[in-house]
Amino acid sequence: MSSETAPFPKESGAGGAFVRQESRFRDRVTADGSSGFPAAAGRYHLYVSLACPWAHRAVIVCELKGLQDVIATTVVDPIRTEETGWRFFDEDPDPLHGWEYLSEGYRLSDPSYAGRVTVPVLWDAETNTIVSNESSEIIEMLNGEFDAFAGNPDLDLYPAAQRSGIDAVNDRIYDTLNNGVYRSGFAASQAAYEEAVVPVFATLDELEDRLGTSRFLFGAEQTLADWRLFTTLVRFDAVYHGHFKCNLRKIAEYPSLFGYLRDLYQTPGVAATVDMDQIKRHYYATHRSINPTGIVPLGPVQDLGAPHGRESLSPW
């Protein structure tokens, strides 16, 4: 696959490597309003795709924190192209502006924007602009800045005492796994592919060892690190293993990782956020340079609701 036919040619680097673009919008909502974007109920809107792992994180944190009535969410169509980008479903139209495409919001926020349109987007309806399109920062805001309005304000997925450790794990997992599967799948040369795919499985092997003795990445309690990992794991066997050629092993072949995946999936409210139909249709029907026929595979068959047996590793 040449760089000219890569799914995102503007993100093709030296030697055929996929180089993800930096997020453009990096403002923050704060509880005290010091950022200029004060936390409030009904002011902010999330644009997400249920197919996208980066957006899926935000959907999960909203669910766990009880922010469904505080921050409205609109889901875009899972099928996107470089010509049109993310578009809105006819049955789930943009409620704020009547946009047909999310790119309209990017242009309204920055008329000079020329990058790829990504989700999630945290939108401020009062100033009519994007606050952030950086998922890692959006989920931190959702975790802590809206507690005055949250249905579950006592849940803290990013405790101050553990932040340095969480950040270090997140950096490692992002580089080699969350983004590593994309670097494998969008590689435009054999060398770039092999350079990316080997660390994917080195990281999975390390996580298998870690999760063999710990229920979650940091012991008994879930953190943002777990949910950043979950959205990659839940897509792995269905998409990344075949579509992105990350086929040395499946998650189902890792006893601890597969149990951990089921454990997280069975957290109340999470299963409803996993739409495997949209996930598979997005990847297989969108990336025609990788899958020219657009055929969406039926498998794999996985029972994520099966008992995971991880309760004994650490107390809930």
Image (cartoon, rainbow, N blue to C red):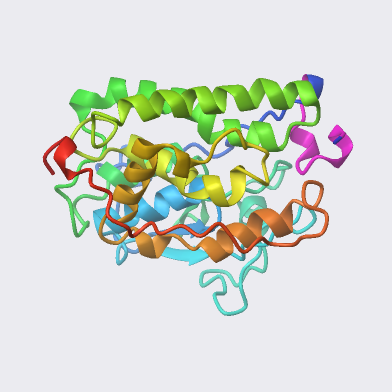
Q: Can residue 139 be seen in this view?
A: yes
- Front-lying residue, 215 or 73: 215
Decide if residue 290 is on the left or right side of residue 271.
Answer: right
Decide if residue 158 is on the left or right side of residue 198.
Answer: left
Up-down relation of residue 191 to residue 9 (above or below): above
Instruction: Tell me the residue at 86%/41% (across/down).
Output: 5
Give the percent coordinates (x, y) of residue 223: 27, 38
Give the percent coordinates (x, y) of residue 13: 76, 24
Instruction: Give yes or no for residue 178 being in the magenta stretch.
Output: no
Q: Outermost residue toward the bottom?
A: 91
Up-down relation of residue 14 to residue 152 (above or below): above
Instruction: Tell me the residue at 31%/49% (across/down).
Output: 264
Highlighted magenta segment, given as a residue range: 2-14
Instruction: Tell me the residue at 29%/31% (across/down).
Output: 217
Q: Quadrant of residue 259?
A: top left
Q: Quadrant of residue 227?
A: top left
Instruction: Tell me the residue at 46%/52% (across/down).
Output: 56
Q: Quadrant of the C terminus?
A: top left
Give the percent coordinates (x, y) of residue 200: 55, 28
Up-down relation of residue 179 to residue 64 (above or below): above
Decide if residue 29 is on the left or right side of residue 47.
Answer: left
- Front-lying residue, 25 or 225: 225
Q: Outermost residue toward the left?
A: 315
Give the percent coordinates (x, y) of residue 42: 34, 64
Q: Can residue 29 be seen in this view?
A: no
